[in-house]
Image: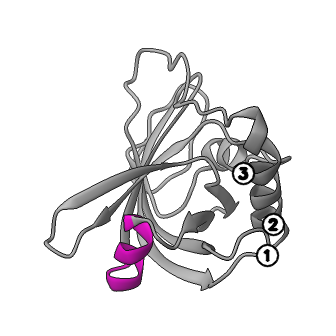
């Protein structure tokens, strides 16, 4: 399959300007799902890459991602200063993508916690990192402790309701 096209059963694509339907369907993550977790890379003030995991990241549309972020986190400072981001994401059985885009803070304070903000990422390119032969056994997992589970559920619900 040529660059920029969506996926069809049994075909391998290289890159696309938006999330292909199969990737969007899994990254849409309805009903407050945390897993699979995405790894978001930003650029520090000194130009070095910085990565962090986010279970709140979800696809709103094939060209728009949204996530919650702590305003005291390096990711927040980096997005405010330099909106370039790259998202690495894995999901069984055959999704492994890198998503390049531009991020911005769209809500300076979430209702559930004053130190949480909402970040949106405009998708610029989706690169297929999946090997042609093989299976992803699991994505990156995260389970919040029981005593803060409701906090996570509430934060993700607020992001999904925007």
Task: Identify whether 34 is placed above or below 77.
Answer: above
Relative to the observer, which residue lies in front, 162 or 107? 107
Q: Please identify the quadrant where the C terminus is shown.
A: bottom right
Residue at the spot 57% in from the left edge and 55% down from the top edge = 19
Residue at the spot 61% in from the left edge and 55% down from the top edge = 57
Task: Identify whether 91 is placed above or below 148.
Answer: above
Residue 79's x, y, as percent?
40, 76
Which element type, helix, strand or loop, lies under badge 3? loop
Residue at the spot 59% in from the left edge and 24% down from the top edge = 92
The residue to which callout 1 is attached is 111
- Residue lying furthest front in this view? 147
3D distance between C-alphas at marks 3 and 2: 15 Å
Q: Residue 155 carries which label?
A: none
Query: Quick one: label 3 or label 2, which is nearer the N terminus?
Result: 3
Q: Give the range drawn in magenta.
A: 74-83
Magenta stretch: dominant SS? helix
Query: Quick one: label 1 or label 3, which is nearer the N terminus?
Result: 3
The reply to whether discs 1 and 2 touch (Cβ–Cβ < 8 Å) is: yes
Which element type, helix, strand or loop, lies under badge 1? loop
- Residue lying furthest left in this view? 46
The residue to which callout 3 is attached is 28
The residue to which callout 2 is attached is 158
Does the magenta portion include 141? no
């Amino acid at each position: 399959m040529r660059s920029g096209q969506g996926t069809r059963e049994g075909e391998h694509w290289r890159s696309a300007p938006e999330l292909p339907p199969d990737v969007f369907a899994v990254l849409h993550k309805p009903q407050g799902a945390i897993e699979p977790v995405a790894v978001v890379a930003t650029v520090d003030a000194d130009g070095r890459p910085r990565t962090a995991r986010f279970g709140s990241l979800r696809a709103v549309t094939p060209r728009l991602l949204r996530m919650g972020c702590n305003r005291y986190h390096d990711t927040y400072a980096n997005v405010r200063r330099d909106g370039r981001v790259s998202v690495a994401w894995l999901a069984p059985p055959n999704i492994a993508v890198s998503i390049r885009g531009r991020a911005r803070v769209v809500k300076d304070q979430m209702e559930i916690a004053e130190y949480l903000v909402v970040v949106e990422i405009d998708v610029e390119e989706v690169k297929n990192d999946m090997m042609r032969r093989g299976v992803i056994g699991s994505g990156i997992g995260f389970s919040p402790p029981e005593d803060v589970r409701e906090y996570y559920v509430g934060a993700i619900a607020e992001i999904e309701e925007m």
